[in-house]
Image: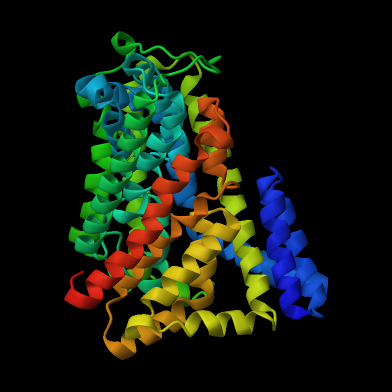
Amino acid sequence: METLGILLSLFLLMFFAYRGFSVILFAPIFALMAAAMSGLSIMPAYTELFMAKAVVYVKSFFPIFMLGAVFGKVMEDTGLAKGIAAAIIKGLGKERAMLSVVLACAVLTYGGISLFVVVFAVYPFASALFREANIPKRLIPGTVALGAFTFTMDSFPGTPQIQNIIPTNFFGTTIYAAPILGIIGGLIIFAGGLYWLENRRKAAAAAGEGYGNHNEAVQEKREEAALPAWYLSVLPLVTVLVVNFVMTNLFVWNPNLLQPFAAMDLPLIAASVKNVISIWALIIALVCGIVVAIALGITRLPKGGLAKALNAGAIGSLLAIMNTASEVGYGNIIAALPGFKAISDALMGIKIGGTPLVSEAVTVTTLAGITGSASGGMSIALDLMAKDWLAWANQIGLSPEVLHRVASMASGGMDTLPHNGAVITLLAVCGLTHRESYPDIFVVTILKTMTVFIIIALHLFTGIL
């Protein structure tokens, strides 16, 4: 009955999320249903476990969500994001339409702009370019997904996306963890995804399929003359990357910074400074990026536009973090149930290669798929099992950096099942359906899940980081 309750709860959460119901509301409902079927009291499970774990997640990562959303909104409303996308796409031209869209998305994502903003910024140019090159519109979502949802989201070292930040809090690593493995994995995903998309384009061309007739949901014309120059538009992104690198790798943080706050008996989010350096560094970097973006683009905003952009970014971040925090609370209730022990033992029992890496990869990608969220699934997995994986790694001399990179990359593959919020948003913006475009999204993102096991094997055989 206990295991049945967990499985039924997971199925219902996936079903309702796919149908468009908010996980903020339904995650606690189905978690408490599982708790009740296991004999736990509902109200203590809700207030002392679900809410306690959700609040810890908000406390740890809310500044990243908020500042990232504000940065993205300022870049969007000032036209700076579109200026970068337009320059890349125009520079490569219709002969390399897919490559140009992938690179435009990749540059914006690696520069710290949220995936959702990238979709809105790039789509109008991608649509115009695909129409000009007579490439089927149904291939746009897969092309955008490859550039924004894969190698620059969590594979390449240094990316400031939340999926690369979360492991630092558990393993005491930095966002540059396992750089060689990350670069190799990212290049495999980039090359493999582009190969798939180009073959799909060639097959469509051979069948005589062109862009198609579509009632466009948004205005799809490029207005390069009205956009800021790319070399100015890119400065906020460069600022985020440079400041983040300096504060992470060059600035010397005082290891005793937390001691006065520990003396106050405060519930600290990390045991030591090294566990929060990446979070602090990115907070500082995003603030600097926002200031630079405002300075460069404020004249392009209408009266009251700055306040509107800042407010919209701040308010928008609330939904994103509460969705994820609700999923984290859900996962922790499930983990506390007696029936989960068998599941946990089975996952920890995966000893392929004699390391925790395969166990970690399978666990993270499975939970990301169930929740439909890379950050949510990874947070649940690490909150439940990171200590065990780290202890296992320490016993065999495995670097925590590899644990970081495997967790980060594994989070972003199976998460893009049909109920994923980013997938639903991408299809809505493009005016396409799951039936038309989801298969390509699935292939280019599931490629990352496969690549995780390649880099695990590469590390086991060579020892490179």
Give the camera-side residue of 119 and 134: 134
Report the number of numbered marks.
0
- The residue that appears at 42% across and 24% down in the rendered structure is 136
- Snapshot quadrant of residue 127: top left
Give the position of the C terminus as an image quadrant: bottom left
Picture layout, residue 195 above or below residue 398:
above
Tell me which residue sits at (64%, 64%) in the image: 329
Answer whether residue 259 is visible to the viewer in this image.
no
Q: Residue 258 in the image: x percent, y percent?
A: 39, 71
Residue drawn at point x = 55 percent, y = 50 percent: 417
> At x 59% / y 63%, what residue is drawn?
328
Q: Is residue 356 above or below residue 143?
A: below
Q: Residue furthest bottom?
A: 395
164 horizontally vs 43: left or right: left
Q: Residue furthest top?
A: 225
**Residue 103 position in % (x across, y down):** 27, 35
